[in-house]
Amino acid sequence: MAARSCKGGGSHNVKAGESVRWLPRRRASSLLLPGNDCWVFDRSSVLCNHFNGDGEMTGEELVTDAGVVHACVSAFEAIWERATPHEEYRPV
């Protein structure tokens, strides 16, 4: 799903107190990113979301392997540094 189509949904997350940032793909080319959509919880586990070729969710996987968690945390920290806060982001 393109960031342009997700932008409106981020407002709900911000209202709920979540910090949301946006990273255009052109600024992510030099980053090593997780292969799956995922959430990191307390730097101790990662919930990976799995999708089929049509974008439909096919399942989830809770990962606690320290190496995988560290790799995901490192990736998200690098993304966060480059990303633009929700309030400032304007799709190009």
Image (cartoon, rainbow, N blue to C red):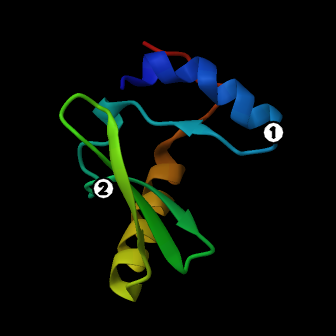
Q: Residue 16 carries which label?
A: 1
Element type where label 2 sits in the image: loop
User: Label 2, on which residue?
Assistant: 33
Residue at the image position 54 percent from the left and 81 percent from the top: 44
Q: Where is residue 45 in the image (x, y as percent from the top left)?
A: 50, 75
Q: Distance between the residues labelled 2 and 1?
A: 26 Å
Q: Residue 43 carries which label?
A: none
Element type where label 1 sits in the image: loop
**Quick check: 80 left or right of 64?**
right
Residue at the image position 26 percent from the left and 58 percent from the top: 32
Q: Is residue 87 visible?
A: no
> Which residue is at the far front?
58
User: Image quadrant for the C terminus?
Assistant: top left
| Disc 1: CA contacts within 10 A as few (<14), some (14-19) or many (>=20) | few
| Disc 2: CA contacts within 10 A as few (<14), some (14-19) or many (>=20) | some
Q: Where is residue 86 in the image (x, y as percent from the top left)?
A: 65, 30
Q: Can residue 6 be seen in this view?
A: yes
